[in-house]
Each structure stands twice: as C-alpha cells, then as structure tokens.
Image (cartoon, grey):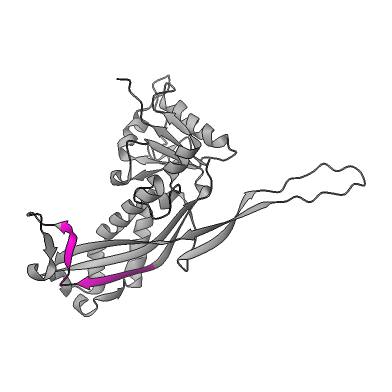
Amino acid sequence: MLQDAKTGSIPKEQGTLVIKEFMQTSATTQLAKYEPMTKPEKEFSYLASGPGAYWVGEGEKIQTGKATWLTAKMVTKKLGIILPASKEFLRYSVSDFFNAMKPAIRESFAIKFDQAALFGINSPFGTGTSVWEKVQSSGNKVELNSLGNLYDEFNGVMALVEDSDKDVNGFTTTRRFRQKLRGAKDSNGLPIFNDAKAGATSQALGLPIGYVDSKSWDYSKAHLLAADWDYTRYGILQDIEYKISEDATLTTINDANGEPINLFERDMFALRATMQVGFMTLSDDAFAAITPEVVAP
C-alpha cells in the first residue's frame, strides 16, 4: 500500500517508463544528443575543429596537424512537481499509483524542460544557453513570408547554419504550424513537404521535425527552430524521488475561493516528484529560426 511507502525512489520499472515517456514527449530530447550522467556535474571534451593536412614536397618533413578540443561542463538541475490527489489513491500499490500519475508527471517535466532549453523561459541553465538565445546572438533569422514561399524560407534558415560550416539535422515547431507545412505547395500546386513513407509533415526536406507542446513555445519569438542539434546536449540523472504528504499546505495552488489548499483540512494528500536534468549548447552559430511576420501598421 502506498501509505506504507510515503518516501523514496519511484520503483525502477515505473521510473524508467516515466523517463522514457518524458524523452518521447520532449522535442529537445528527440533532437539533441544525449550525454550519460552519473552525477550532477559532468565535464566532457568535444572536437571544435579537426586537424589540417599539408602539402609536402619530396624529402620534406610532414607537418603535424593540431585538432582543437574544447571542454564543456554540464550541470543538472532539479525539476519538480506536486500533484494533489484524493485519499483513495493511498490504497493503491506504489506501482499502480505511479501508473496513474505517469501522464501528469511526464507532461509537466517535458513542458518545463523544453521551455528552458528552447527559449530560456525560467531557465536554471544560465543566460545565453537556450536555442533561441543563440539565434538572437547570431542573428540567424528568416521572417515568415519574406521570401515568397515556405520552401524558400526553410532553405534560408538552413543556409544560415550552413554558412558556419554546420548542417541542419532537424527542426522543431508546434502543431499549430503543422497546417502551414501541410498546406505548402509548389508552382504546380503539389504539396512540398508530404513524405509518403514517413507520414505527412513528419519530415521537411528529408529532415525530422519535432513537435513541441504549445505550452512550451513562445509564439512571439519564432514559428520554427532549425539547428545542427549535435551542438546541443542533454543529460538525465535516472533516479526519480518522491515524497507523500497528508498535512502540507499548498501555497502555489488555490481553490475556487482563492485560498491555499490545506491537505489535512480537506482529507487529501499530495505527491512531490523530482528529477534532475541538464542541458547545454556548444556553439553560437548552429541555430536559426523562422520568425513571425512583421506587419506594418
């Protein structure tokens, strides 16, 4: 019974499922490179530029090329959620309870992580780390409807990244923008982005599109983000911890009368679940965006 195990780690099977579904829900984790984490901080090296070759005359010494390796440090930060529930849930087994709570935990964690990683919204990872902040600093933007059609605008954002000798390997946007992808046509009136094998609009120009929950997106900044996602990294500390309380007062949520919820008074309980995730970007020019059209007054 859950009431006999009010504090601890989510059972391994359930914790693995929550993390797996979190990774399938978050657009960032679908596109960025995963960096295994066994502790809250991890330093790793990555190749910033490869060694050069040299022309060699007969009998001359072959020069030694030098690769540039840089060191980056990723720090995980805590994500948390508190879910109030009726007392009846305390009669569930621990596994059954987390099966019931999985969707809420997964969605909450994925939305908050994507907000921070993509747009820097309430980000604990530091100023200038998010994808959008990198777009801002590089100026890699193409305004919607500025090039005549969506195909040329996709090509334009890819070109901005390619100008820095990097390759766009995926896009991320929202389902609200999907209708524009689905409706884009060439000069013969044929759909541009439909891919019969992969499913309509799951790819554009042969590259995958990760769709983000609308709650994770800042529509005032961008319609779509393009990137060489090899220059983004994320990490997850696998343990998810939980604690059950029956007497706390929840000050971050109010009832219909605008009052904080006292669990003891209402014969309820609340689950607090936490996990630790990390995110970082490794380049200033690997990102670009299709931005909203500026309409003249």
Which residue extends farthest right? 59
Q: Is residue 207 visible?
A: no
Horizontal side of 54 relative to 256 (left or right) equals right
Assign the N terminus to one quadrant of the image. Answer: bottom left
Q: Is residue 194 above or below residue 227?
A: above
Using the rendered view, name the quadrant where residue 219 is placed.
top left
Residue 210 shows up from this direction: yes
- Residue range (magenta): 239-253
Residue shown at 27% from the left, 61% from the top? 81
Is 254 situated left or right of 149 in this image? left
Residue 171 drawn above or below residue 141: below
- Asked if 234 appears above or below 136 in the picture, the reply is below
| Image spot of residue 94 (x, y percent) | 25, 73
Q: Quadrant of the C terminus?
A: top left
Q: Residue reaching furthest front?
A: 127
Q: Give the residue at x 66% y 51%.
A: 68
Residue drawn 22% across the image and 69% down it = 97
Task: Locate residue 54, reporting x and y percent.
Answer: 79, 43
Furthest-bottom residue in view? Answer: 4
Helix, strand or loop for the magenta stretch, by majority: strand
Choose between 136 and 108: the one closer to the eye: 136
Q: Is residue 32 magenta?
A: no
Q: Between 288 and 261, which is closer to the camera in this rendering?
A: 261
Q: Position of residue 66 (x, y in %)?
A: 72, 51
> Where residue 281 appears, x then y in whole percent?
49, 49
